[in-house]
Amino acid sequence: MIKFYLCCVAWLFLGMFSYGCSGHKENHPSDAGSSESVGPPADTTVKKNLSSFAIGAVIDDVTANSDPSQHFALYLPKSYNQARRLPALLLFDPHAGGTAVVRKYAGLADEFGFILAASNNSHNGLELDQTDQIAATLLQEILQRTKADSGRISYGGFSGGSKVALHAAKRNILIRNVIYAGAAMDLDQSTHSFPLLGFAGVDDMNYNDLLSFDQTITRTFQHYLIRWNGKHEWPDPTVYRKAFYWILFSDMKNQVIPIDEAWRQRYLQEPAPVPSTLLAPQWDYLQVMEKMAFLNGIVDVTDYGKQLALMSNTPGVKQALQAEKSQMIEEDHLKQSLWQDGFSQNRDLNWWKAKIDAIHSMPDAQTSHHLLGFISLNCYGAVDNLLRAGQLAKAQEALGIYGLADPQNPDQAYFMAVLSAKNNNAAEALQWLQTAKQRGFTEWSKAEAEPAFANIRSTGTYQALIH
């Protein structure tokens, strides 16, 4: 099966311009319309000492004692006290948006009794040794400045942040679990195994890659992949709560904490919304498989195994699994066609408009979403590198395609602002920055470092945007 992307794909565009993709705007927790957990109030004050950390309030920006250039968001659950150590989940966002992520899941941290922290430095485009150091610094800070249990530390991430979590965990035996969403990476060179839980939105452009990763990962890793009704975004809190169950059950299996029947019963009573693209027989099959993966080592799962054996031979499950396999193959062929007939042929905007209109009209909405995401991801990398290279005319053409494929993408608007600034159109640059913010753009440190914005940085409009 041909694979074109997991983090990025090569691009030949308008003059055979090649690149390595450094990132792509994912749907962020702060995006309009995202579902937030009902969390506690925010405390934006920078804290320095363990005794001064607020309990039950999101702390937006903590400066690392060991490296003042590093910052993270922190949440100590309402159950936090000096007498008892708690598990900790450390998270990595692809756009250094740790604060928004902590706010999104703070309610879950309260419910399950977890310390929650997320880096405000880790982002797409950094080298792995840089992100490894960011992860190590965050771990050190949490262990030294909170009552985190050093035997109950987990990493988690979304998209490029998943790769940060997975790569750092491969080299650190203190990490007991990794929760990944939206992307994954090869684990063959890991020095040790650790339990893995994944989340794949059925409308995520990387959905098929996540299914393939789940099917091919070595058997030395305990793992399961949860499918949910979402796009390329951090999972909704109503879904992500499964991550906290997974970690608790993993600790029980490894005898880090006693087996707690009450938590098992709570888990079994959790609602399980059926993803829109899955038929009932397949979803029923996956639900039994999930219970077996979550509870194996806590209770006898023999009956679940027998159920799976019976269900796998039913016509409904057989047909659903075969249809999914066929859909994955067909989608890869369509991506190959987009690459060969579109990207590598330097097609103009009219060709792409007709192609994207045809994709929108496809009867299979899931495949349509995946293909549009595939185009958007390629456009991100091409535009980024064309702008850096000063090829402004080619960047404008690529941005036109980007806008057709992903009209609400905040990065497309941000790049339009950069292009306008490079063309010495300050008013237009500010308008596009406002549009980027309306669409959910949050990487203002990136804007602060952009040389093209030198002439607009002192304006009141710009200052209002970044504060």
Image: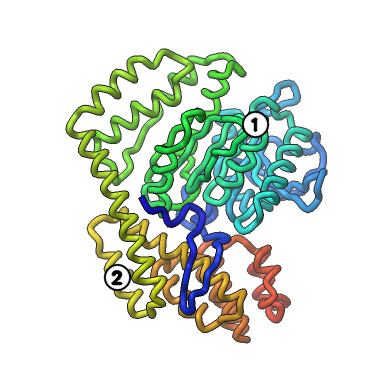
The residue under the point 52% across, 23% down is: 249
User: Could you tell me which secondary element the residue under label 1 belongs to?
Assistant: strand
Cβ–Cβ under 8 Å for marks 2 and 1: no
The one of 133 and 460 positioned closer to us in this rendering:
133
The residue under the point 29% across, 70% down is: 357
Q: Is residue 430 visible?
A: no
Q: Residue furthest bottom?
A: 424
Residue 102 coordinates in the image, percent (x, y): 61, 44
Residue 205 coordinates in the image, percent (x, y): 41, 54
Residue 191 coordinates in the image, percent (x, y): 63, 33
Quadrant position of the C terminus in the picture? bottom right
The residue under the point 57% across, 30% down is: 193
The image's mark for residue 153 is: 1
Q: Residue furthest left?
A: 315
Residue 99 coordinates in the image, percent (x, y): 63, 49
Judge left or right: residue 80 versus residue 144: left
Q: Is residue 353 visible?
A: yes
Picture quadrant where residue 114 is located: top right
Q: Which residue is mark 2?
A: 357
> Measured along the vertical axis of the image, is residue 291 above or below residue 124?
above
Q: Amino acid at mark 1?
A: Ile
The residue under the point 41% across, 71% down is: 343
User: Could you tell me which secondary element the residue under label 2 belongs to?
Assistant: helix
Q: Amino acid at mark 2?
A: Asp
Q: CA distance from mark 2 to mark 1?
A: 47 Å
